[in-house]
Image (tube, rainbow, N blue to C red):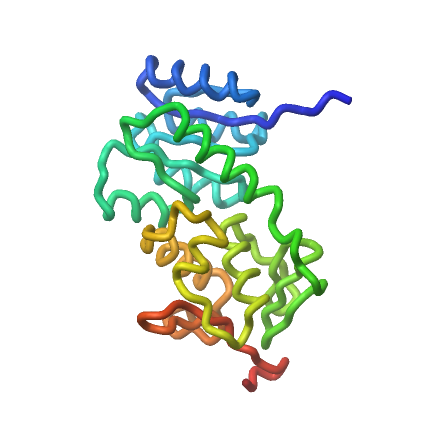
Amino acid sequence: MITKKQTVLVADDDPRLLKLIQRNLEIANYRVVTVSDGPSVLKQAESEEPDLYVLDIMMPGLDGREVTRRLREFSIAPVLMLTAKDTEDDKVAGLEAGADDYLTKPFGAPELIARVKALMRRAKQYTKEATTPSFTTGELTVDFSQHQALREGQPINLTPTEYRILAHLARNAGRVVTQDDLLTKVWGPAYRDEAHLLRVNIARLRQKVEPEPSNPKYVITRPGIGYSLTKLEPNGVS
């Protein structure tokens, strides 16, 4: 049986780097589509339906952040953002746009492949360890069997990363989950110190699941410790 190769769309306006990334991903057995500007990403996204995007944050036409924002209107495929700036503000800007992870230039092929594999794995696995089909709190339901969340019965368009955060909180509803535990569970042990990854994704998650994101009733911050998912009855009473 021939297994279909997963498709990675890579966008960078540096032709040498683009070729290098393509070569290393193909060696790792991925099918690679390359483009050199932002508008081409959106055009290829429609026809190729990539499993993952690797986007340079600075591209002609549309930068990586704007491309990611537009991708998130119709795609939950993981986005790995490439940035030449190793500052938290730059990383956070990419994450806030909808990226799942980032890689700072210059980087080595092993690190690139490791990040891509980790994102692909998380996107596929979701919740193999789920022991119950779903969890409901108030008007929010996490359907473990279908790997999705619903609010008032309507599906919520979560990225794989956002879903994994919510699912892990749901499995521990009513209990505080530490920041380290969430980072390790969702991203992996190497991400234990990447607090901004979690902070930005929690903010994105609240924008989608909370009736009032600035005054959350589901995903609650426990200062200095972590986060918890409130257990509410269907009428909203805890």
Q: Residue furthest bottom?
A: 237
Q: Say above or below: 73 vs 166.
A: above
Q: Which is more toward the observer, 87 or 117?
A: 117
Q: In the figure, residue 40 lies in which quadrant?
A: top left
Q: Say above or below: 20 vs 10.
A: above
Residue at 48%, 21% (x, y): give it.
25
Q: In the figure, residue 54 lies in which quadrant?
A: top left
Residue 210's spot in the image, x, y percent? 48, 68
Residue 149's spot in the image, x, y percent? 60, 60
Left/right of residue 13 with respect to residue 232 in the rendered view: left
Residue at 42%, 68% (x, y): give it.
227
Q: Quadrant of the N terminus?
A: top right
Q: Say above or below: 130 vs 64.
A: below
Q: Residue furthest right?
A: 1
Residue 59's spot in the image, x, y percent? 31, 27
Left/right of residue 52 with respect to residue 196 in the rendered view: right
Residue at 55%, 30% (x, y): give it.
50
